[in-house]
Image: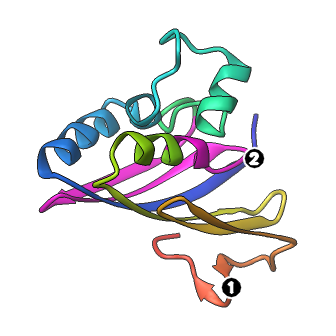
Amino acid sequence: MPNWCDNTAKIEGPVDLMYDLAHAIARDEMLSFMAPLPTNEWEYSTAVDVWGTKWDTGCSDGYMEHDIQDGIIEVNFQTAWGPPIQAYDKFLEKHPEVTITASYYEGGNNFGGMYEDGEEHHREDMPHSKTVYGKLIPYL
């Protein structure tokens, strides 16, 4: 059983693309939609390389909720061991018209960070609260 990493993301883009992403989220396939695995079949090391985490957001005991309006998705979810930074990066490479602002906190290993449009700010040895750089992480 992994340590769960709490994530929140605000993803903005064309309404039709956000609509498709919202449907993928509802099917528990957010990361598969953002960064498809090369063979479309799960394999541990490939998933970690492509997504930054071993399971898609809906697998196992993870928690997810989302809301979409006007081309904006706000989503809270959990991933195994760490955030899906590689999936965000791959999605932005494919869709430069999209913006992603995200934060994450993994209390078991005491780290967290923020992500904004390809730039990650990671912090180790965080206090046992859901704050990053003095700010409360939204939605966590």
Disc 1, SS? loop
User: Which is nearer the eye, 6 or 44?
Assistant: 44
Q: Residue 35 placed where, x, y %?
A: 46, 32
The part of the image, by quadrant, that contains residue 101 is: bottom left
Q: Which residue is mark 1?
A: 133
Is residue 114 found inside the magenta-colored segment of the image?
no
Could you tell me which quadrant the N terminus lies in? top right
Residue at the spot of label 2: 3
Q: Is residue 72 magenta?
A: yes
Determine whether label 1 and label 2 are within 8 Å by CB: no
Q: Residues within 10 Å of mark 2 (few under 14, many from 20)?
A: some
- Residue 111 falls in image quadrant: bottom right
- In x, y percent, where is residue 73? 28, 57
Q: Nearer the viewer, mark 1 or mark 2?
A: 1
In front here: 87 or 130?
87
* Amino acid type of the residue tagged 1 in the rendering: Tyr
**Residue 137 vs residue 133: left or right?**
left
Please tell me how crowded label 1 is: few (under 14), some (14-19), or many (20+) other residues with Cα within 10 Å: few
Residue 58 point in image, percent of width and height: 47, 35
Q: Which mark is residue 17?
A: none
Q: Residue at x 82, y 65 (%)?
A: 110
Which residues, given as a range, are shown in magenta? 61-87
Task: Please give the name of the residue rendered at 81% of the width and 80% of the height, measured from the top-left corner.
Answer: 127
Relative placement, left or right, of 14 versus 134 is left
Residue located 53% across and 30% down the image: 59
Please name the amino acid that badge 2 sits on. Asn
Q: Earlier in the sequence, mark 1 or mark 2?
A: 2
Residue 23: give x, y in percent of width and height.
Answer: 23, 36
Which residue is pictured at 53% across the width and 58% down the height?
Answer: 118
Residue most toward the right? 125
